[in-house]
Every structure is written in structure tokens, then in C-alpha cells.
Amino acid sequence: MIGEARPGDSPRAPRRRRLSRSAEFERVYRQGRSKANRYMILYVFPRVSDSPARDDEGPRLGLSVSRRVGRAVTRTHVKRIVREAFWAEAARLSHAADYVVVARPDAGPLADREGLNGIRPALAELVDEVGVRRTPSEPPS
């Protein structure tokens, strides 16, 4: 039916939970920490703000999937799966941080072949390695 959610559909992240400006991406790339594996690079930049409300917004995600990953359909598929895997991991992440995931060319075939079952463990491994976790004082998302 029209407007009916299908299994596996996740609502779009609110605008305040996404990185969209070039300057935001640049700050994360230049000042953040990074970890990489064969499929993606995860950059993390802890946000510092004077406003506690800003920190309660939760983690923010930016994605970069270049043409080297594949054609438009493959890139869109990779983005959708990475988004879903990221938000599944969001409860473990620091709410006061910005994250950028850069997909590498091997992410395309992995997403096509294994879908979420391939991307989620790869992303979880990077989250564990980078070590930015939610503190006990932060509310769950």
C-alpha cells in the first residue's frame, strides 16, 4: 500500500543528524581521528560546544561514496546500507561527535554480494577501533 513501511525500511535521519556542508566534512577530515579497513574509512571528530543542547543532538553522519565504488545504482545501494548500519550502531556511539564514512571501491561488491550482513560488521569493527563511545552521562539515542 502507498505510505506503508516495508520491513527493513528506516526513517530518514533528521537534518540535524546529518553533515551536509563542505566545511563540516573538512573539519572532520582535518581535525578528526580515522581508522580504515578494506571497505571504508571512518573519520570521527568530537564536537566541542558551549551549548549542552548541541551535544544532545546525537551523532551526526556524513557519507562520501565516489564513482570508483561503482555506477549510480551501486553507490546508492552502498549509501543506503552504510546509513542503516551506522544508525544500528548509533546507540554505542558518542552523541557529541561527527562521523564521516568514506566508502572504498571494495564496498560496492561487498554491498551487492552480502548487503547489510557484510557492511555492518566492517563498520562495527571500525567503530570499535576508533574508540569513541557514548559516556554513561549521555542519554541513549
Image (cartoon, rainbow, N blue to C red):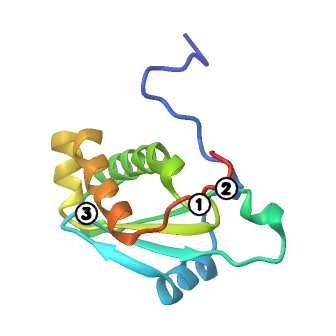
Are circles 1 and 3 on residues that touch, CB within 8 Å?
Answer: no
Are circles 2 and 1 on residues that touch, CB within 8 Å?
Answer: yes
Which residue is more in the foreground, 141 or 12?
141
**Which residue of the protein is positioned furthest toward the bottom in this rendering?**
30
Q: Quadrant of residue 68?
A: bottom left
Question: How many numbered marks are there?
Answer: 3
Mark 2: amino acid = Glu
Mark 3: amino acid = Val
Q: Is residue 44 above or below residue 106?
A: below
Q: Secondary structure at mark 3?
A: helix
Q: Residue at x 53, y 80 (%)?
A: 28
* Residue 106 picture location, percent across and down: 18, 62
* Residue 16 picture location, percent across and down: 71, 57
The numbered mark at residue 123 is none
Are circles 2 and 3 on residues that touch, CB within 8 Å?
Answer: no
**Which residue of the protein is positioned furthest toward the front in this rendering?**
136
The numbered mark at residue 135 is 1
The numbered mark at residue 138 is 2
Q: Residues within 10 Å of mark 1 (few under 14, many from 20)?
A: few
Q: Residues within 10 Å of mark 2 (few under 14, many from 20)?
A: some
* Residue 118 picture location, percent across and down: 22, 46
| For residue 75, side relative to residue 134 (left or right) | left
Q: Earlier in the sequence, mark 1 or mark 3?
A: 3
**In which quadrant will I find the C terminus?**
top right
* Residue 56 picture location, percent across and down: 74, 57
Q: Residue at x 38, y 50 (%)?
A: 76
Kindly report which numbered mark, 1 or 3, lies closer to the viewer in this rendering: 1
Kindly report which numbered mark, 2 or 3, lies closer to the viewer in this rendering: 2
**In which quadrant will I find the N terminus?**
top right
| For residue 14, side relative to residue 108 (left or right) | right
